Image: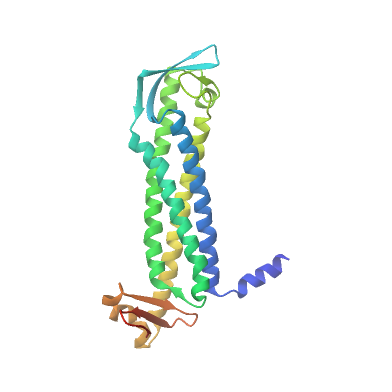
Amino acid sequence: MSDVRGTMLDKLPKRHKFRFSQIFVNGIVFVLSLCACIPSGWTYNFFNFECVLYADLSVSVKDNSTVVLDWAGSTWGKPTQCHVVTYAPVVAAIHAFIWIWFYLQMEELDGKIQSLPALLFGCVLHGCISLALLVSSGMLTGGVNKLCHNLQSRLPTYSCSQLEDMQWTTLKGTEEFYTYMKVTEVCTWFSAITSAVLAVLNGYRAWSIISQLKRRGDPETGSVLLRRGRQFGSSHFFLDESFSVRSLTVDRRTSNIV
């Protein structure tokens, strides 16, 4: 069975393999981003929308089961930090969903062509999303470590994982805030790495297409990107399986395929 599946995959055109890989990897980013933003939102809500990243909480333990939180004596993190950590995965999830939809619709519109501008545009967008997630991941990792360091300096006999199982006064009972933040941290890091992989895939695919065009001696294909650079914003260049280029230009009156 595995040999049959391998043979079927080998027979697929490159454009189909690339399209399936984009749908699959974007799906991974979508799931990871949801798994990052939802726990982060729960933690933010548990502390009454106060940011716990880099926070120095004034706490004490009563009867080994209750954490007494002194709001006045606590120093909270900046709200912007929690907003970035929470909403960066939200943006990444929406971005991944849009690309999934794009590649699903691409086959229905025209399964025989691959948009070169979409590859270049996708490389830039995935790179920006990856950079934003990396910044968010760094802030989250540093914020969680600082929070736990401050808690353990006040309560040396307790760890963050132990404190999250206790009843917190003035809050909404118990909440696995440390576990949730670690889940958010791990998922955000993996989402950032996966988005970087998408940027590399799109960039490599675009580079291979341009390289194939430049290696051809036909002036209508080899230098088409250079000769029509001024029209790049208004034209869409497509590549078929034989690496021939077609430019689709739309004007006010009619659409002509060159």
Does residue 193 lie above or below 240 as drawn?
above
Rendering quarter of residue 236:
bottom left
Does residue 200 lie above or below 133 as drawn?
below
Q: Residue at x 37, y 88 (%)?
A: 218
Given the current orientation, which residue lies at the most extreme left position? Answer: 230
**Residue 183: x %, y % from top left:** 51, 39
Q: Residue at x 43, y 55 (%)?
A: 95
Given the current orientation, which residue lies at the most extreme top position? Answer: 63
Q: Quadrant of the C terminus?
A: bottom left
Rendering quarter of residue 65:
top right
Does residue 218 lie above or below 173 as drawn?
below
Q: In this rendered view, identify the residue nearer to me: 123 or 104.
A: 104
**Residue 221: x %, y % from top left:** 37, 84
- Would residue 242 appear left or right of 10 to someone viewing this image? left
- Would residue 3 appear left or right of 166 to someone viewing this image? right
Does residue 128 lie above or below 22 as drawn?
above
Q: Residue at x 50, y 63 (%)?
A: 22
Q: Residue at x 73, y 66 (%)?
A: 1
Residue 104 seen in this snapshot: yes
Q: In this rendered view, identify the residue nearer to me: 173 or 60.
A: 173
